Image (cartoon, helix red, strand yellow):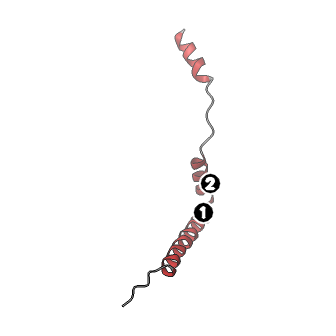
Amino acid sequence: MTNKKNLEKYSSHKIPPPSFVKLAMKNMVRKGSQSLTHLGLTAFGVLGFIITIAYLARPNIPN
């Protein structure tokens, strides 16, 4: 009898929707190389931006 009550209690719980991270990972796996290409381009873009800013803002040390 207690088993039936426990089953009813747990069966009424709804499964929460998947998190955004899980959905993003599923999408990345499904799209494959396109996602990796975009990730690589983004990484190179951010790295290039940081290097450009570091070059333009370098300190001017007198000799």
Say which residue appears at 62% left-offset and 65% top-offset.
Answer: 34
Say which residue appears at 59% left-offset and 57% top-offset.
Answer: 28
Residue 9 spot, x, y in % from top left: 58, 19
- Between the residue at mark 1 and the residue at mark 2, the CA separation in whole angstroms equals 9 Å
Tell me: residue 61, above or below residue 30.
Answer: below
Say which residue appears at 52% left-offset and 78% top-offset.
Answer: 52
Say which residue appears at 63% left-offset and 39% top-offset.
Answer: 17
Which residue ends up furthest to the front in the rendered image? 62
Residues at discs 1 and 2 in contact (Cβ within 8 Å): yes
Disc 1: CA contacts within 10 A as few (<14), some (14-19) or many (>=20): some
Disc 2: CA contacts within 10 A as few (<14), some (14-19) or many (>=20): few
Quarter containing the N terminus: top right
Residue 41 spot, x, y in % from top left: 58, 71
User: Residue 35 shows which numbered tag?
Assistant: 1
Q: How many marks?
A: 2
Circle 1 — which element?
Answer: helix
5 and 48: which one is in front?
48
Whichever of labels 1 and 2 marks the residue nearer the N terminus, that label is 2
Name the residue type under label 2.
Answer: Asn
9 and 51: which one is in front?
51
Tell me: residue 28, above or below residue 20.
Answer: below
Residue 44 spot, x, y in % from top left: 54, 73
Which residue ends up furthest to the top in the rendered image? 1
Say which residue label 2 marks. 27
Tell me: residue 36, above or below residue 58.
Answer: above
Q: Left or right: where does residue 1 sit relative to residue 60?
A: right
Res 13 → quadrant: top right
Which residue ends up furthest to the bottom in the rendered image? 63
Circle 2 — which element?
Answer: helix
